[in-house]
Image (tube, grey):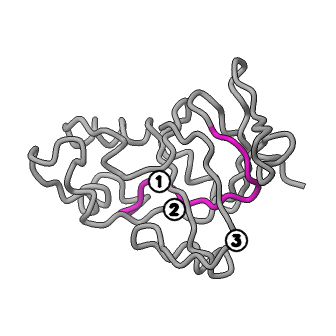
């Protein structure tokens, strides 16, 4: 998913993304979170239920690919660092709020519990309704009704189509 120039500010923000309390619980009351969905996880769910699903059904801000299915769950409590695609620069010289090296970091807060809202495909709303929380819990009981992870922007920077997210080394 393309999210050029994603920025956050420390103003009196009160909007809460979706129905999550991930920011409130895990980020000192700050509700500004982004939702990351792994395309490989969505493909595995599609194969298991026999219906082709688009990652956009899960209302992500960021879609990643190239991971094993469900690998994103291992990122909870860790920091992801944006690594620029080789043909892109990460620096935005016109914005003082973006780090000088343009490297964005995201703290992964929690897995995303799924609600009935994802039962409707936003790209094809007339295609019918699926009870995704029940399907997830039935076919993937080890993960329950969860798909995707919530994160917060730790260090501002640019995120562009083709960039990679890498786990930051732990100390």
Mark 3–mark 1 Cα distance, whole angstroms, equals 25 Å
Say if 13 sits above or below 48 in the image. Answer: below
From the viewer's perspective, tell me whether residue 155 is left or right of residue 113.
right
Say if 139 sits above or below 66 in the image. Answer: below
Q: Work out whether residue 96 or residue 114 is closer to the camera in this orientation and state it.
A: 96
User: Which contiguous range is marked in magenta?
Assistant: 144-159
Residue 25 falls in image quadrant: bottom right
Mark 1–mark 2 Cα distance, whole angstroms, equals 6 Å
Pinpoint residue 83: horizontal percent, then vertical percent.
73, 34
Tell me which label, 3 or 2, sits earlier in the chain: 3
Q: Which residue is mark 2?
A: 111
Callout 1: 10 Å neighbours few (<14), some, many (20+)? many
* Disc 2, SS: strand
From the viewer's perspective, tell me whether residue 171 is left or right of residue 89.
right
Q: Work out whether residue 168 or residue 152 is closer to the camera in this orientation and state it.
A: 152
Pinpoint residue 60: horizontal percent, then vertical percent.
44, 50
Q: Which of label 3 and label 2 is nearer to you? A: 3
Residue 3 falls in image quadrant: top right
Tell me which label, 3 or 1, sits earlier in the chain: 3
Residue located 36% across and 59% down the image: 141
Q: Which residue is mark 3?
A: 10
Which quadrant is the C terminus positioned in? bottom right
């Amino acid at each position: 998913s393309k999210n050029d120039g994603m920025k956050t500010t420390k103003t009196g923000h009160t909007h809460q993304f979706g129905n999550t309390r991930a920011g409130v619980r895990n980020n000192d009351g700050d509700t500004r979170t982004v939702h990351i969905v792994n395309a490989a996880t969505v493909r595995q769910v599609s194969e298991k239920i026999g219906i082709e699903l688009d990652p956009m059904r899960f209302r992500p801000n960021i879609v990643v690919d190239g991971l094993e299915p469900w690998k994103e769950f291992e990122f909870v409590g860790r920091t992801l660092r944006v690594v620029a695609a080789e043909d892109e620069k990460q620096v935005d010289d016109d914005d003082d709020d973006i780090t000088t090296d343009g490297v964005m970091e995201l703290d992964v807060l929690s897995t995303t519990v799924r609600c009935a809202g994802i039962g409707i495909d936003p790209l094809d709303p007339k295609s019918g309704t699926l009870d995704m929380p029940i399907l997830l819990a039935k076919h993937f009981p080890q993960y329950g009704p969860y798909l995707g992870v919530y994160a917060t922007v730790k260090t501002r920077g640019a995120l562009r189509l083709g960039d990679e997210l890498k786990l930051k080394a732990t100390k």
